[in-house]
Image: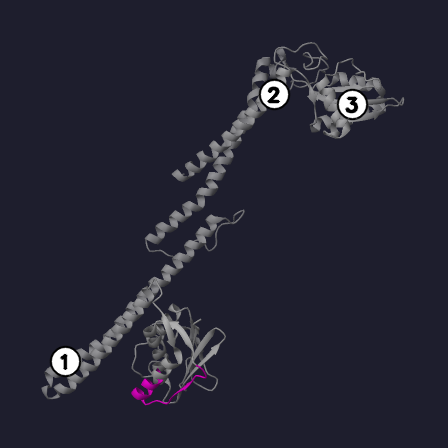
Amino acid sequence: MGRLFWKFFLSILLAQVAATIGIGSTIWLRDQARQRSGEPTLDTSPPATIMLDAAAATLKHGGPDALRDLAASSRRMHLYVLDEQDHELLGRPVSAKLREEVERSLRGDGPTHAVTRLAGPDGRSYLVFASRAWHMPGTPGPHGMPGFAPPDGAGRGPDSGPRMDGGPGPGPGGGWFGLPPEFGRHVGRWLPIVAATLASLLFAALLAWYFSRPIRALQRAFDAAAAGDLAPRFAHPAPRLIGDELAELGHDFDRMSAQLRALMDGQRRLLHDVSHELRSPLARLQAAIGLAHQQPDRLQASLDRIERESVRMDRLVGELLTLSRLEAATAPPPTEPVDLVEMVDQIADDARFEAGAAVAVDAPEPVTVRAAPDLLWSAVENIVRNAVKHGAGGPVDIRVHPDADLVHIEVLDRGPGIAPEHLGDVFEPFFRSNPTRNNVDGHGLGLAIAKRVVETHGGRIAAANRADGGLRVTITLRRAV
């Protein structure tokens, strides 16, 4: 049991003990007030209702004499029976306060089940109700007087159990199982407090264990994560009565650990891919340098090779830096209105000049978006260059068409396309579809950079194979308001 368990336990226990003391003090003060008043009150408890039903059956089958005997033998409460002349059958006086409570019940202003009218076999009517008499211990008073308990043994049979008020019972000496009468009074006084304390201890322990158990599980999960174990631990939790915030916290931890695991795997994969991409140009650089030393007559060819490989490495490092900045950015870049059609026309002109490719632009109307011009230019240019490289020398079409408050940019080529199972990976860094068959220059970072740029601008990007051959890459952005 950790410190958190004991904190929960003590907090819950103190709250329950405070509630028990408060409720017990209220009841005790009420009882003390009733004892000081010395007057009986109308009993509305379920036992009183049962006693009234018993009185009705007794009057029906035994008559008024049997009802009088029942009233005289009642020990746990006083059963009052008033005839038509308002006389009590046992001659006991009825206090004014008790009469007032009975009249209120008859009028419907009080509990109607606490008073009943009965008709005897002789046709006479009787008013029957029950009351509980409060008395100070040690001052029992005469039997039958209101506000006092009947004397010891009055109306008791030989098989009667111990008195509810702590009086003498059937054992030797008149106490509980032979114990003095004072023992019964003390037990009756302290038994509710002891029972409430034990119940508070039990429920406090159960609640503290219930709350501290998932927190201990989270602590173990964090310790395992700190040691490098990011496996999910709350995907299949133990059955619980209800789902709560602690269970949701466990699921959030699983999602966090899954994201951390994905990021770590991505970093390892990126490091592996970067090492692989740098190894080839470095090996060619070393080979060119060695060839220059061995064959001085081919020095110019070796220098040309060194220059090409240096340019490739510089381009790779530049693309990696761009991708890293996009992934590490915590705030969106500053934007401004950009004429999308003008930008696409310039990118198409550059592609025609550099690669001599047939690049057509279809833009029915001017479209303006809010974007970072340099980043958006880089994204669209990477997609167009990718289409030119992999388009197998066929024409490349760029279509810009608005749709309500959105604008779609489609880049279509006539190349071999991408295998359907690889369409979801085409925007991952260093991904190449059939690298041996598509022997083109590049590192597989262009589409990854384009995806990060589009997502930074709150847009979407998707790739799909065309029905008549080739690949379609679609960028969706929100138009400027």
Alpha-carbon distance for marks 2 and 1? 106 Å
Q: On screen, 201 above or below 238?
A: above
Q: How is the image coloured?
A: one colour
- The image shows residue 262, relative to residue 110, as above or below, that is below
Gap in Å between the C-alphas at discs 3 and 2? 25 Å
* Count of numbered circles on the image: 3
Residue that numbered label 2 is attached to:
31
Which amino acid, mark 1? Answer: Ile
| Residues tagged 2 and 1 counted as in contact (Cβ below 8 A) | no
Query: 6 or 395: which is nearer to us?
Result: 395
* Residue positioned most to the right: 122
In the picture, the disc for residue 128 is 3
Q: Residues within 10 Å of mark 2 (few under 14, many from 20)?
A: some
Q: Residues within 10 Å of mark 3 (few under 14, many from 20)?
A: many
- In the drawing, does residue 266 fall left or right of residue 120? left
Q: Quadrant of residue 437?
A: bottom left
Disc 2 marks a residue whose amino acid type is Asp
* SS at badge 2: helix
Question: Does the CB distance between marks 3 and 2 fall below 8 Å?
Answer: no
Image x and y of residue 273, in percent? 29, 71
Sequence-earlier tag: 3 or 2:
2
Relative placement, left or right, of 169 versus 196 is right
Q: Which mark is residue 289?
A: 1
How many neighbours does mark 1 have within 10 angstroms: few (below 14), some (14-19), or many (20 or more)? Answer: some
Q: Which residues are magenta?
A: 347-365
For mark 3, give the secondary structure. strand
Residue 300, percent across and down? 14, 87
Q: Is residue 60 left or right of residue 267?
A: right
Q: Nearer the viewer, residue 109 or 418?
A: 109
